[in-house]
Image (cartoon, rainbow, N blue to C red):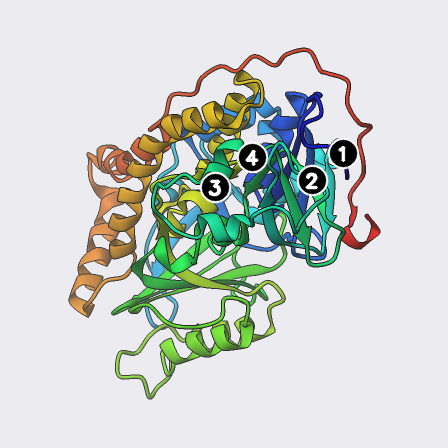
Amino acid sequence: MSGAASSPRTTPRTVLISGASIAGPALAYWLHRYGFAVTVVERAPELRTGGYKVDIRGAAIEVVERMGILEDIQRASTDMQTGAYVDDEGKRIATLPADIFGARVDRDDEIMRGELARILYDRTRADVEYLFGDSITSITPITPLAPATSTTSTTSITSITGRSDDHHDSSEATADGVEVTFERGAPRRFDLVVGADGLHSTVRRLTFGPEEQFVRHLGAYISAFSMPNELGLDREELYHAVPGKLICAYSSAGDPAAKGLLVFRSPRLTYDHRDTAQQLALVEDAFDGIGTESSAVGGWREVPRLLEAAHKASDFYFDGMQLIEMDRWSRGRVVLLGDAAHCASPASGQGTGMALVGAYVLAGELAAAGGEPEQAFARYEEQMRGYVEVNHALARKFAQEMTVDTRRQIRFRHLMMRILPHMPWKNLVAKKIAEDVQRGAHAITLKDYPVPGRAAGPAPVAARPAYAA
């Protein structure tokens, strides 16, 4: 792309979104409706359809309904029926409805992350340019007097904003678009760049500085992976706890395989988040001997089989239970969305909902502000901050509760769950269990953003590899 930076603006504006998981395609959907020309770049060579089950609750239900995908989500629901804690031999100690385990009420639903990604991709692929197999390497603001194609006469955002303070360089205030370079594709100019690229966001690193400034470790790690359904699970999730660790196996509707989930408490570990072998070694070490005769704490006999499945899984996932905490989510013409801006960790159960809601709010504010970033980004943060803070607080609480310290605490939890179904006030207890989660899910009131008449713009493009650009 070329042309003078001072040339008259036309609509739709051009927006580059980094990340094709949930937040990125959801934002692309709304921006396209508002008349923006959208490109999504994704490091993976194709759409990533793995992952664990995710909840859609409260305000997020309103968003997907407005997107017209609520029925798609309902059809792809995990349809979980029951949850149970099991002993070392796999005997069910206590069984409850799955909605109690998931703190779901009313129209709340649950879907596999990969299924939701597919739904969002299918809804946007004809109208949005997808560049798979590529990623951003630099983001450079273009000043009004600078040539749009120059990458040497402008100052890199990395050099002017590689810090977390609120200092505003004059280059930010006068930037008239950004020049982006890629690992594989040719450099291109965009009016705005959105980092929707997750906990380990490249856009955040390039724009705000090293990840370590913003990560708050919650004291635990989580791994998820597909595994053979040798337990014969049918829309059921089984949980087993040993001190400092939680083990789970479950199956969802329509999936012949099962999923394994391993959580362990640990101080912050040093590892490469792209090195699967290194991550598997950390999981092996954490669960070494659990479920075997030689283990001092015993443990579910299925644990060795789960570890074996983790090594064979093509969708193995591992990461810390971590928050991203930032004073601001935008700088110049770059803004962060979803986990890149405010990851609440899997402990919150709200990450997917926050991504969907954030996409709706950011797109709506950009449209309301006529695409001008300063006003739109400020209003986006104003709308989202309280919602994020409530769910960050929940994440801190739930991260501590996912694992317990002693066998005595585990036995007490089992006892409470065993007697709950027989209590006359069990519905009140179930409501109380869901109360905190529901408070987080409803901690924002959505504004109505009218969709204007569509402006003429470039013809839709289909998904293609970045190197074909």
Q: Which of 447 and 468 is in front in this view?
A: 468
What distance separates the C-alpha of mark 1 from that of mark 3?
32 Å
**Looking at the image, is mark 4 or mark 2 earlier in the sequence?**
4
Q: Which amino acid does label 1 sit on?
A: Gly
Q: Which amino acid does label 4 sit on?
A: Ala
What distance separates the C-alpha of mark 2 from that of mark 3?
23 Å
> Residue lying farthest bottom?
294
- Residue position for label 1: 3
**Looking at the image, is mark 4 or mark 1 earlier in the sequence?**
1
**Looking at the image, is mark 1 or mark 3 earlier in the sequence?**
1
- Residue position for label 4: 175
What distance separates the C-alpha of mark 4 from that of mark 3?
24 Å
Please indicate, yes or no, whether residue 235 appears anywhere in the rendered image. Answer: no
Nearest to viewer (mark 4 / mark 3): 4
**Looking at the image, is mark 1 or mark 2 earlier in the sequence?**
1
Residue 338: assigned label: 3
- Relative to 25, is 298 on the left or the right? left
Residue 189: assigned label: 2
Q: How crowded is mark 3: few (under 14 residues within 10 Å), some or many (20 or more)?
A: many
Q: Residues within 10 Å of mark 4 (few under 14, many from 20)?
A: many
Q: Residues within 10 Å of mark 1 (few under 14, many from 20)?
A: few
**From what the image shows, is residue 262 above or below residue 464?**
below
Image coords of residue 190 (percent x, y): 66, 37
Nearest to viewer (mark 1 / mark 2): 1
Q: Which amino acid does label 2 sit on?
A: Arg
- Is disc 1 placed on a helix, strand or loop? loop
Nearest to viewer (mark 4 / mark 2): 4
